[in-house]
Amino acid sequence: MGQAIHKMNNPHKLLIIDDNKEILSALKDFFTRKNYEVFSATDGLEGLKLLETEQQGFDLIITDLIMPNISGVALISIIKKRFPDTPVIAITGWGEHPEALATEAQADKVLEKPFELSELDRLIKDLLPPV
């Protein structure tokens, strides 16, 4: 019983993956201040390693689509196969039709760069149950 109560006080855990370090650190700072527990990775491979090693898993994943090693599109399809209940938000500043890419990979939401942090925050709140 005590554990359930403790879990409810814990912030949601986010995994943010982006090869742009400025964007990554801005997102990390913003969501840490918003009381999320934030993990970050600079490419798809590093993100995948975190997914495999983090025992409790993540409540939500935010990933860039175009990255070295493993693309965001490939990463999202891996996430959706292995963690089908974990919502994924794709962020991208690339291409004419980023939505098509992300939809193909089954992202829950797509956000085009540049975007407002408040907009991303709202999307996360839509996808996650209240704490």
Image (cartoon, helix red, strand yellow):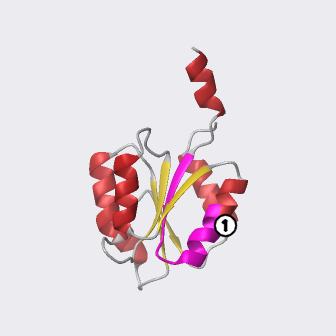
Q: In the rendered image of this protein, does residue 70 appear above or below residue 3?
A: below
Q: Position of residue 63 (x, y in %)?
A: 45, 65
Furthest residue toward right: 33
Quarter of the image for the C terminus: give it.
Answer: top right
Q: Position of residue 52 (x, y in %)?
A: 34, 49
Quarter of the image for the N terminus: give it.
Answer: top right
Residue tagged by mark 1? Answer: 117
Q: Position of residue 5 (x, y in %)?
A: 62, 22
Q: In the rendered image of this protein, does residue 21 appear above or below residue 50?
A: below
Residue visible at 41% across and 85% down? 95
Q: Using the rendered view, name the quadrant where residue 100 is placed.
A: bottom left
Q: In the shown orientation, is residue 64 left or right of residue 27?
A: left
Residue visible at 33% across and 63% down? 75
Q: In the shown orientation, is residue 82 left or right of residue 58?
A: left
Does 102 appear in magenta?
Answer: no
Q: Which stretch did the figure color magenta?
A: 13-28
Q: Secondary structure at mark 1?
A: helix
Does 19 appear in magenta?
Answer: yes
Give the amino acid at mark 1. Answer: Leu
- Please tell me which residue lies in front, 6 or 65: 6
Q: In the rendered image of this protein, does residue 52 appear above or below residue 55?
A: below
Residue visible at 72% across and 55% down? 33
